[in-house]
Amino acid sequence: MIQQERLNEVFQTFGWVRIPEVLHQLAEEASRDNISYLEFLDKLLSEELLSKQERAVQMRKRLARLPFLKTLDQFDFSFQPSIDEKRIRDLSSLRFIEHQENLVFLGPPGVGKTHLAVSLGLKALENRYSVYFVTAHDMVQTLQQSCAKGTVQRRVKTFTKHQICLLLMRLDTEK
């Protein structure tokens, strides 16, 4: 078995996907720049670790079921001057999670409640928290269906196993 095949087997065994992509480039740079073996290994493993962390964030985003991906920086506070920007930015520190506090955004449709909740959810995902987004309507409907099937305990666990559950309630009378 040639060396490259053996390395590919090892990479696959460990589940490393980024190292095979950058190995030759980093090896050439190490040779050209006279980098030590340990420094080369550090660069190689750092690439893999960063890639793994990025994939984990992407997976958590998919599992969170966010309706869209918008950050706090994309929120137009001038559009809603009644929203306390300083308070919202303070919430983005995520201390409320550590203190196990709940957040409630109240207001009529179109003021940015969902955007703010999603942006805090994204921030939490990037900080390795698990997040789940659900509308109150969908949650009630899902729980009713689960009751009928006798699986309500399992369904409740779906909602409660996450560190953050973003529950969106519409206060208008249209739905």
Image (cartoon, grey):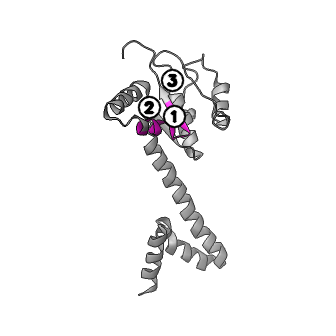
Type of amino acid at the residue the image marks with label 2: Val
The crowd level at tag 3 (other Cα within 10 Å; few <14, some 14-19, many 20+) is: some
- Report the amino acid beneath label 1: Cys
| Sequence-earlier tag: 2 or 3 | 3
What residue lies at 57% left-to-right and 44% top-to-bottom? 129
Q: Are marks 2 and 3 in contact (CB under 8 Å)?
A: no
Q: Is residue 103 above or below residue 63?
A: above
What element does badge 2 sit on?
strand
Q: Is residue 165 magenta?
A: yes
Residue furthest to the top in view is: 173
Per the image, the residue denoted by label 3 is 112
Q: Residues within 10 Å of mark 2 (few under 14, many from 20)?
A: some
Q: Is residue 118 visible?
A: no
| Nearer-the-camera pick, 63 or 53 | 63
Closer to the camera in the image, 20 or 15: 15
Q: Which residue is mark 1?
A: 165
Mark 2 lies on residue: 134
